[in-house]
Amino acid sequence: MRLAEEGMLCSLCRKRAVISQRYLGRQLCQDHFVRDFEGRMVQSIERSRMIEEGERIAVAVSGGKDSTALLFALARVFAGREVELVAVTVDEGIAGYRDDTILAAERIARQLGIEQVIVSFREEYGYDLDEMVVGSEVAPCTHCGVFRKSSLNRAAKRLGAAKLATGHNQDDEAQSVMMNYLKGDMERLMRFRPRREQPGLVPRIKPLRDLPEKEIALYAILNGIYFESRECPYAQLALRADVRDMMNRMESLFPGTRQRTLRGFERIEALYKEGWGQMELAECRECGEPCVGERCKACELLGRLRG
Ligand code: SF4
Ligand SMILES: [Zn+2]
Ligand SMILES: [Zn+2]
């Protein structure tokens, strides 16, 4: 994979370019791209103080390219430092899709010598995702998101992790902002980036949030860790799929659209900070996980499943 046209040269050293970053108006060769990629991730980490020396960080690794690249890049930039990484892989129970990615997650953890734990919906909640969605009016991705979040939080707590890192990239972040605009959901939009810690909730960090998905794929390929995973069979049912196509079209017509969407959101967020205070979370009366109200979303969905 090469994201630059034939004959393009690195803007910094004049070697053959592997990528043209139109939104930054420059091209980079392999060495400069890899160095810049890791540097930008470190910048995001430092700017938001995502990781401190001495911390144990749970990294959600699905086996897809983003989380694989995240684990690899974190292992590289924190090598020799007092930061311990543990990989957490969630098996949602999606037939014909997750088995390969779980193997890929095991492979990358082993290659990097990082401890890995696998948690499954079946073990944690008694059902595979495939079972949960049969005859349900609730969308598969809603089930998946709620139980994945909860499984990851529970696993991170059991591991004594200070933070939970996920592989969300700039595309995901811009899509989430746009989806909340389209749904007119200001509540959720303003809760998108929590500002303070809540009891029982392991703080989530997104070290790749300023990096475009394509560049993450290129980073994975150049480092020999790319794994082409199949698309989840439920993906096309989600609003996100349409928003993703629209944002990709806009980005190619108007480079920098994603970055501007996120910057715009940050400005709105800064303006409305006071008006949209973060809700106090309580403990779910059934499972003890943090939630809004008396019962967490996972227990609510489980209640429906059990009839
Ligand atoms: S597409 Fe939906 S169901 Fe599939 S893994 Fe993603 S969130 Fe889960
Ligand atoms: Zn160069
Ligand atoms: Zn609960």
Image: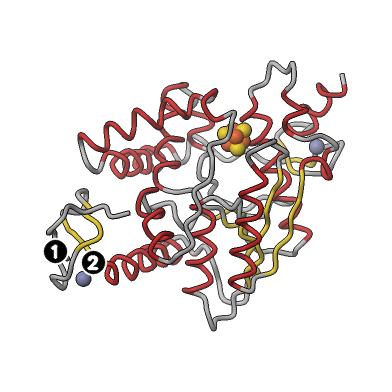
At x 66%, y 37%, the residue is 96
Ligand 3 located in image quadrant: top right
Give the quadrant of the N terminus: bottom left
Left or right: 233, with 174 as reference point: right
At which x and y percent is residue 2? 28, 55
- The quadrant where residue 233 appears: top right
Viewer-proximal residue, 5 or 304?
Answer: 5
Q: What element carries label 2?
A: strand
Left or right: 306, with 31 as reference point: right
At x 13%, y 59%, the residue is 8
At x 42%, y 22%, the residue is 182
Residue located beneath label 2 in the image: 29
Viewer-proximal residue, 137 or 182?
Answer: 137
At which x and y percent is residue 238? 53, 25
Q: Are marks 1 and 2 in contact (CB under 8 Å)?
A: yes
Specify few, some or many for label 1: CA neighbours under 10 Å numbering under 14, 14-19, or 20 or more.
Answer: many
At which x and y percent is residue 230? 54, 40
Compared with 37, 178 (above or below) is above
- The quadrant where residue 307 appears: top right
Name the residue type under label 1: Leu
State the residue lying farthest toward the bottom. Answer: 80
Badge 1 or badge 2: first in the primary sequence: 1
Residue located beneath label 1 in the image: 9
